[in-house]
Image: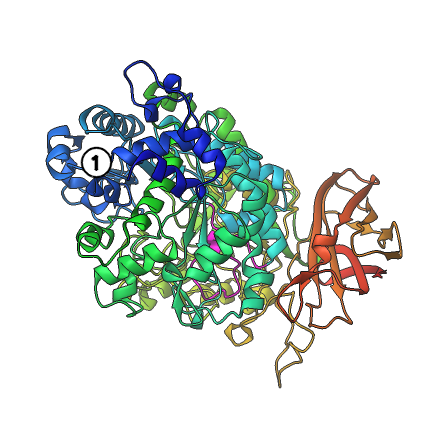
Amino acid sequence: MNRRGALRLLAGGSIAALAVAQAPLAFAKAGAPLYKDARAPVQARVADLLARMTLAEKVAQLRGVWAGKGAMLSGLDFDPAKASANFPDGIGALGRPSDKRGTPGVGQAAGGSADRWRTPRQTVEFINALQKWALEGTRLGIPVLVHEESLHGYMATQATMFPQAIAMAGTFDTDLVRRVHTVIAREVRTRGTHYVLSPVVDIARDPRWGRIEETFGEDPYLVSEMSVAAVEGLQGPGKFDRLPPDHVFATLKHFTGHGQPDSGINAGPSEASERELRENFFPPFRAAIERTSIAAVMPSYNEIDGVPNHSNVWLLDKVLRGEWGFDGIVSSDYNGVDQLVTLHHIAADDGEAARLALMAGVDSELPDGQCFATLPDQVRAGKVDPALIDRACARVLTFKMRARLFENPYGDAAKTEAITANAEARALALEAARKSLCLLTNRNGTLPLDPAKMGRVAVIGPNHDIVRFGGYSSVPKQAVTLIEGLRAAAPQAELVTAQGVFITTSDDRSVDTVELFPHDRNLQLIAQAVSVAKTCDTIVLAIGDTEQTSREGFAKTHLGDRDNLDIVGDQNALVDALVALGKPLVVCAINGRPPSWPNVVARADALLECWYSGQEGGTAMAEALLGKVNPGAKLPVSVVRDAGQIPLFYNHKPSARRGYLFEDAAPLFPFGHGLSYTSFDISPPRLSATRVAADQPVQVEATVTNTGRRAGDEVVQLYITRTELPVTRPVLELKGFERVTLTPGESRTVRFTITPAQLAYFDRAMKEVNGPGPVAVHVGNSSANLKSSGFVVA
């Protein structure tokens, strides 16, 4: 392909593209090819480079390397001679340079101990050697697109670990999410990585699914706002052409329907209709594409209506690029393309899988490009149109130039060591942990504990002396357990401890087999805990999950989903034994899956939902228990009573949730629920108009007052209900929220704008419209505690 043909490919043969094609060679440095000139337009540089590349070099740009990293290593070090021998056409992408995958004895390196990971300096040295070889030792000098994971912190040693995504969603604080992801981006970028596989923007509608902890919850508006904030933190705000300093390109994943799989099992089929997709699962992706410069989208493992997403032309081409104008790369999930053969059975072999994915719009196959490796032979055999190769390669090259990789792909070891998990990052992790704590129950004002009255305190449970980080975590520079936090916050208090039970036999989330701790041994531990608690006046019990009981189930041999949502193992027996002592029992829920624990809820005097609260969680939990911090988070999901209620979400249709024989159809806790140590009053909503045209917004005001005796946070939530339309609408839809901090007696007016776009719906022809009809407007502090007003769209 010549340069003019490449430009036609990039811009449909437009006049603008031809003008760039005829641009004077002054764009280029003397004697240097145009594609190496950072001053030239990206489009022209890509066209110039694409015209110089062989077929093999183009395909190499579409493939990743992860499990195959050993082919470029001598021990732990990058070996340019081996790389040249084994990757003669260059390397398109490389996964997780911070892990030791490819070295002897290291498997998936998805978690566990620090010996599976490179140190920060080793990571920088590896990336810098790799990129030096790519720029100077390959024919065209094309840098490698290196990616890492950063779900709730950079998944690498010593990096700052923030609260898990579901906990961050519960803060209802987009500014906090933005600031957290800004720090994550800085820690990633200084090590030499310009691209991360986050955030997760799936709508989560099945708590059996082990990946629910990775999400921002069940509501499309909340997830959209949190997702946009995360992308802005990682990449920088707004629209731009080149990646700003100290930022990284983000990935929206997993597109889509992933969060409500058949039977709650990861990668299971999505039964969502097109309407369901457009109303609930699409909005976070669409919002980020329309409001940011998001650079990558990752398809999900599941199928929709019989078509696996990695081969779905309608999803990846018509909707993503055609309707929304997405112009970045579509990068496969790990093994997502080869699963068209092994899991979905729609392709006979790797070659057919590659054709299906490439035609659908997948540009980069991760982790090792085993299917795309067949593309050169398929082009030569006439099975694959070379224009499809050029299209994908142009997108990958554009990404690399927008990331400034051709100018500076290197990391900075000294800067990495200076800023990674520094005091600023640690303070932000503590702020995030504090704001993510959600008080679910508090009978008779059990909390906060008064150090002068709580007496001797028993701190018991499988999670009292360990930090649970959740999925996609590594080993941070420092971390604080609950008991450490309590000892620091109340140094004069008399605190005694007991294990109570163990949940599983191992805490390593990488191992395939998960075994519950033996029942007979747990009974002995329960007896010991009871003996300790008998000597105490108050009991603090830390129970919940491990990284094994709620995790990504990525294979039949590595499961993570569950059919029973109650607390795992012998923890209920421990609760019952401690309740029988008749002492105040405070439960700290440290978990990734929502707490569908009816026995615990019924019997504990107070229940504090802590989620996986990150490296500083122990300090935050202790402060909350002692009243130094007032919990203010809300639930980003509806908590079911048991698995028989699934699916259960607050924004259901009017005909749903009629009721059950012998059981309560209401959730155990509603979406948006969360208590405080103080009390608040929220006024009914005041509207700027009672009748508007379809293109007019409505202003909404409400006054929130702290009516209690402590300072605290309240989240004012705005919902609407639309009726009398040609299609059914949810009974409630979240359309705004604001978290406010008020001192005792203080009032504040909160203002929202309901835009025509927020009122819009998809009609019977699947066109987005804002039709006439009544709109109820609700304001309150949860989806179950609202005051209402209304207006009419004329």
Apparent side of residue 156 relative to residue 450 in the rendered image (left or right): left
Q: What is the residue that sits farthest to the top in this orientation?
A: 30
In the image, residue 92 above or below residue 571: above
Q: Position of residue 318 (x, y in %)?
A: 48, 57
Mark 1 residue crowding within 10 angstroms, few (<14) / some (14–19) / many (20+): many
Quarter occupied by the N terminus: top left
Report if residue 747 lies within the magenta region: no
Along the viewing direction, whichever of 736 and 305 lies nearer the viewer: 305
Amino acid of disc 1: Gly
Q: Which residue is mark 1?
A: 90
Q: Quadrant of residue 776?
A: bottom right
Q: Position of residue 72 (x, y in %)?
A: 16, 36
Q: Quadrant of residue 92?
A: top left
In the image, residue 664 above or below residue 220: below
Apparent side of residue 63 relative to residue 164 in the rendered image (left or right): left
Q: Position of residue 203 (x, y in %)?
A: 53, 58
Can residue 308 be spotted in the picture?
yes
Quarter occupied by the C terminus: bottom right
Along the viewing direction, whichever of 273 and 358 lies nearer the viewer: 358
Can residue 402 be spotted in the picture?
no
Q: Which residues are magenta?
A: 199-218
- Look at the numbered disc 1 and give the secondary structure of its residue: loop
Q: Position of residue 257 (x, y in %)?
A: 48, 63
Apparent side of residue 242 relative to residue 726 in the rendered image (left or right): left
Which residue is pictured at 22% across the width and 68% down the height? Answer: 348
Along the viewing direction, whichever of 357 and 612 lies nearer the viewer: 357
